[in-house]
Image (cartoon, rainbow, N blue to C red):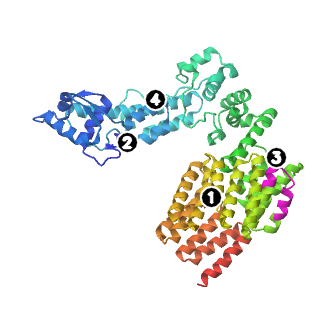
């Protein structure tokens, strides 16, 4: 890739001679050219321009970026070509990334008059193209009655490199148009969300379609132009939760009512303030199903989606499960308080969640009582009870018993369709088998990875445990590679808790290897992630590791204070005993 925006650089190469690179840029952007034309353009005052050209080509030859004889042709792409594609498609985010500066910014060479004119005219043209893309979307926002967004885009465009200078040289400035009628705006949003279904669902007349096309808001095939920051309504992301104009919400709701439920959910979210009784029933059922899938794969998004639903028992239960997964245990416990669970299955599921939380808080006896209640419920609740009993056995060193309980839990989770929890149970079983000295631990780890499939977060969790096993086996290089892969997968999943654990594991590995600087860096990253995710238990664990690394009792004292403030009293007491041992050294 030849970078011509904000400078002149050939990526992946150390070659920096400006004149040959400028020649390459000219060939890429202007197409194949005759040798004599290039020689006279680039070396107009040389005694032998063709010889000067040959020297430049000789310098470029090892790079393999130019070919031809009498007519020369470039064999490399530029960021300007990528920019123009992004401009054409209205992808302003990509435009921001690519437009790092003006065309050939900072390139100062003695150029002939014709070549200098080419550089300056291209620089101006590119700046105007960038401005035009922003202005087109700004104009659309004004037409749609969203002047604040239009104004913000125009101000941003003027702040980009070289744009204000290029625009001020133009004949006339931007004139904000008045907004279209509500019917036209509603028709646009319908076409923006679902061009194939909108005409029929919204009853859009031909006259409105023609008007939108005349205003350059809709192209051929009824497809609306892309607009910066507006959700398309085709995926459950954070964009679907933002507030939109009333006409956009109305269009989204009409479309949602006609579409299959899975396709309709993003549109239902866009139209949340307008839901009627039937919408609450249909959309609520669909969202609960999606959130169940997101508990382990994307818990933060699941938590946001639940905010769109009323606080019914099922919603509070799911909220508690997500908070527990995020390490926010007291919040998870509080989400269950005061809910009336009349259905037996719900009562057992509440017991399963409460038991898991209490166990993590160190309240083991209370947790086991909840597990007994959970055993009487649904397959999922039974799986949670068995998994909890397995964790209890594991903590007491009864590894064979724990492995058996985890195996039974995995079967229950499989029966309940809870694949993510099945992976967790298999993951736990593999650890128990390893602790018991059983060779089949490797097979169960492989089984857990197979069950995890392509889900990044599930794979990351298995790899984190497998990395610990490799460390215990005296294979630190493999352990580090597994932690790094878990880190990559956790980043892909965007889950702070898994990212924090991965960095903490890496820090502990480096710590044990005596690589103090790398350990400190890893621990610091883990600490930032743990605090951002409000995972106070992980935060305390990382602080304790840092205290050990730095030989600093004050840091360990901070971990204890944090646990006490977060009401993790049992864990705080454990860390206090560690503090006593630490200070006695």
Q: CA distance from mark 3 to mark 1?
A: 43 Å
Label number found at residue 88: 4
Residue tagged 3: 312
Q: Position of residue 343 (x, y in %)?
A: 89, 48
Real-space CA distance between mark 1 and mark 4, rounded to the nearest whole angstrom: 52 Å
Residue that label 2 marks = 101
Q: Is residue 139 left or right of residue 131?
A: right
Residue 24 image position (x, y, % from top left) = 28, 36
Q: Nearer the viewer, residue 145 or 383?
A: 383
Residue placed furthest toward the bottom? 584
Mark 3 or 1, nearer chain start: 3
Earlier in the chain: of badge 3 and badge 4, it is 4
Q: Which residue is mark 1?
A: 442
Extent of the magenta region: 368-383
Q: Nearer the viewer, mark 1 or mark 2?
A: 1
Density class for disc 1 (Cα within 10 Å; few <14, some 14-19, many ≥20) is some
Q: Secondary structure at mark 2?
A: loop
Q: Tell me if I can see residue 311 in this picture.
A: no
Residue at 53 percent across and 34 percent down: it is 150
Which image quadrant: the C terminus?
A: bottom right
Residue 511 position (above or below residue 303) = below
CA–CA distance in space, label 3 to label 2: 53 Å
Choose between 560 and 241: the one closer to the eye.
Answer: 560
Picture quadrant of residue 1? top left
The first of marks 2 and 4 along the sequence is 4
Does the magenta stretch mainly form a helix, a strand or a loop?
helix
Specify whether 407 is left or right of 19: right
- Mark 1 to mark 2 CA distance (whole Å): 53 Å
SS at circle 3: loop
Q: Residue at x 27, y 35 (%)?
A: 66
Q: Is residue 370 magenta?
A: yes
């Amino acid at each position: 890739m030849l970078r011509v925006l904000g400078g002149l650089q050939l990526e992946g190469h150390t070659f920096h001679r400006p004149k040959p690179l400028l020649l390459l840029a000219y060939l890429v952007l202007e197409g194949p050219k005759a040798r004599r034309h290039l020689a006279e353009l680039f070396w107009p005052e040389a005694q032998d321009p063709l010889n000067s050209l040959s020297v430049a080509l000789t310098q470029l030859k090892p790079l393999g970026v130019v070919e031809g004889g009498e007519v020369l042709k470039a064999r490399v792409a530029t960021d300007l070509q990528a920019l123009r594609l992004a401009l054409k498609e209205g992808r302003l985010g990509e435009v921001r990334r690519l437009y790092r500066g003006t065309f050939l910014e900072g390139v100062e060479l003695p150029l002939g008059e014709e070549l200098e004119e080419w550089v300056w005219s291209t620089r101006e043209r590119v700046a105007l193209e960038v401005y035009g893309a922003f202005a087109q979307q700004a104009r659309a926002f004004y037409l749609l009655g969203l002047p604040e967004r239009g104004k913000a885009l125009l101000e941003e465009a003027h702040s980009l490199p070289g744009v204000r200078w290029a625009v001020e040289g133009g004949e006339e400035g931007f004139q904000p148009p008045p907004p279209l009628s509500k019917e036209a705006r509603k028709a646009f949003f319908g076409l923006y969300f679902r061009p194939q279904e909108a005409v029929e669902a919204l009853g859009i007349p031909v006259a409105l379609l023609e008007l939108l096309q005349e205003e350059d808001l809709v192209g051929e095939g009824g497809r609306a132009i892309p607009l910066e920051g507006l959700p398309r309504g085709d995926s459950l992301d954070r964009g679907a939760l933002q507030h939109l104009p009333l006409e956009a919400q109305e269009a989204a709701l009409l479309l949602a009512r006609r579409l299959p439920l899975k396709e309709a959910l993003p549109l239902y979210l866009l139209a949340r303030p307008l839901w009627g009784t039937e919408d609450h029933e249909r959309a609520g059922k669909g969202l609960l199903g999606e959130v169940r899938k997101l508990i382990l794969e994307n818990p933060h998004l699941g938590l946001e989606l639940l905010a769109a639903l009323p606080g019914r028992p099922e919603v509070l239960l799911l909220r508690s499960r997500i908070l527990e997964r995020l390490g926010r245990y007291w919040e998870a416990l509080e989400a269950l308080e005061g809910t009336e669970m009349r259905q037996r299955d719900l009562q057992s599921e509440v017991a399963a969640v409460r038991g898991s939380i209490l166990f993590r808080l160190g309240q083991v006896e209370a947790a086991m009582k909840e597990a007994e209640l959970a055993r009487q419920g649904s397959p999922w609740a039974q799986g949670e009870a068995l998994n909890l009993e397995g964790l209890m056995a594991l903590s007491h060193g009864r590894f064979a018993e724990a492995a058996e309980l985890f195996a039974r839990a995995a079967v229950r989770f499989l029966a309940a369709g809870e694949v993510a929890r099945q992976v967790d149970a298999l993951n736990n079983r593999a650890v128990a088998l390893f602790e018991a000295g059983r060779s089949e631990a490797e097979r169960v780890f492989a089984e857990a990875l197979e069950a995890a499939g392509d889900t990044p977060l599930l794979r990351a969790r298995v790899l984190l445990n497998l990395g610990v096993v490799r460390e215990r086996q005296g294979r630190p290089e493999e352990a580090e590679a597994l932690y790094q892969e878990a880190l990559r997968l956790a980043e892909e999943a965007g889950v702070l808790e898994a990212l924090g654990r991965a960095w903490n594991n890496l820090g502990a590995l480096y710590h044990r290897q005596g690589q103090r600087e790398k350990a400190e860096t890893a621990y610091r990253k883990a600490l930032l992630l743990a605090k951002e995710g409000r995972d106070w238990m992980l935060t305390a664990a990382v602080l304790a590791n840092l205290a050990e690394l730095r030989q600093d009792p004050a840091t360990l004292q901070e971990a204890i204070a944090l646990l006490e403030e977060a009401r993790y009293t049992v864990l705080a007491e454990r860390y206090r005993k560690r503090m006593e041992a630490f200070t006695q050294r």
